Amino acid sequence: MAEDSVTPEDMDELISWISTPQGQKHALWVCEQLGISPELKPGNTQAGNSSVIDKILDAEGTAYKPDREDELPQMRRLYPLRKIAVAAAVILLIGSIAFFADKVYLNKSSKRQEIVVHNKPRLILPGSNKAVLTLNNGKQIALDSSSTGLIANDGDATVQKQAGGQLKYTAIQAKPIADKIAYNTLSTPRGGQYKILLPDGTKVWLNAASRITYPTVFTGNDREVSIKGEVYFEVAHNAAKPFIVKTDNNMQVRVLGTHFDVNAYSDENIIKTTLLEGSVKVTSASDEQMLKPGEQMQLSGNGRLKVVKDVDMESIMGWKEGVFNFNDADITFIMRQLSRWYDIDVVYNGAMPKDLFTAIISRNNNISQVLSMLESTLRVHFNIQNRTIYVSN
């Protein structure tokens, strides 16, 4: 059976759980988190699922949001929403889903928060594959509107836009001439992301509001690029030519071939390099340290490097997999990520709560769906005016 499917055993477990006192107690809260319409009736569902709906509707008078974390693990186990959300067996049951999350809860006790319904804003859609390529001569090409195929010859390389939104560089000759090397810059706006295949075979993913500058062909004794924002690398191994990533904050990552993520946004207090595979050496103006897989190097404002072990890789790499993966995140951290992906501005009215939030949310949702979920879980309210989100406590 495909990974994104629900087995009969999954459905039996769900029905059995709803039949228990705990299931009756929490059923409507679970439906709320799933985005299921409270007006959904058994007659509108497929045969075989009506018993599930009946039990949920029977719990209408006991809507409840759990106050204790120890009540949540069982529900998270019973609701693998990545599977449930696409299962044909329950597609009508969750037809009004507004987001998916396999963990959504406030990380400390708090009272149930009511959702405030604001005036209907215009729809703010999620980001997409879009970027601007700046050639060596300064010419700019909007990749989201350009056709697939050859888009430029720059230096000793051809530049092609492939189907599916990837930029590919290919060296024209085996031994390029050093003084003919051209430099290109790929920039994603807020609300954009893009993938590029460098001429050495290195794969690069750019998150929203990010930039990478690189030669169209690598010559000399190393392969050097510079970045801003967040960029993920799968570096093609070449023992003779180290791959070097530089940031604006005098941090340098040196590798031969490995997988790692660099988060160097200017509005974040700490620059982070997270290693998934291989090994890297990270240097700053005053320090130098090695990283092992599963570790993260943090560069603070004083130029010192700090190694953090056993980091949450799923949270770090969520953006590349198409989700926001928040793990003990506060509202300001969440809104910075939303601001980049949805191309919105954020204004805070008053002090924000210190609550920490854990959730996995699809980046394909529109902004209203994401904010509605946050509003139902955190002690914050949102008001959308044009492309500005006003956040209040």
Image: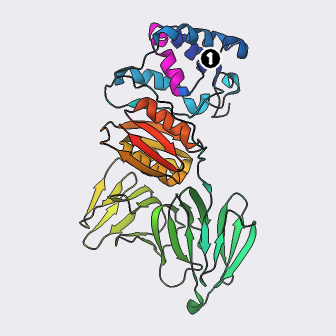
Confirm whether residue 199 shows in the render.
no
Report crowding for label 1: few under 14, some 14 to 19, many 20 or more residues within 10 A (C-alpha).
Answer: few
Which of the 4 image quadrants contains residue 122? Answer: top right
Quadrant location, the N terminus: top right
Q: Identify the residue shown where x is 60% and y is 22%.
A: 37
Q: Identify the residue shown where x is 41% and y is 61%.
A: 265
Magenta region includes residue 28:
yes
Quadrant location, the C terminus: top left
Q: Position of residue 85 (x, y in %)?
A: 62, 30
**In this rendering, position of residue 88 left or right of residue 32:** right
Magenta part of the chain? 21-33
Q: Identify the residue shown where x is 54% and y is 29%.
A: 80
106 or 116, which lies in front? 116
**Snapshot colouring:** rainbow
Q: Main secondary structure of the magenta part?
A: helix
392 or 197, which lies in front? 392
Q: Identify the residue shown where x is 55% and y is 62%.
A: 189
Q: Amino acid at mark 1?
A: Glu
Q: Position of residue 238 (x, y in %)?
A: 52, 72
Residue under numbered circle 1: 39
Compared to residue 211, the image places residue 294 above or below, namely: above
Compared to residue 297, the image places residue 41 above or below, namely: above
Q: Secondary structure at mark 1?
A: loop
257 or 264, which lies in front? 264
Magenta region includes residue 169:
no
161 or 245, which lies in front? 161
**In this rendering, position of residue 261 left or right of residue 364:** left
Q: Position of residue 168 (x, y in %)?
A: 66, 69
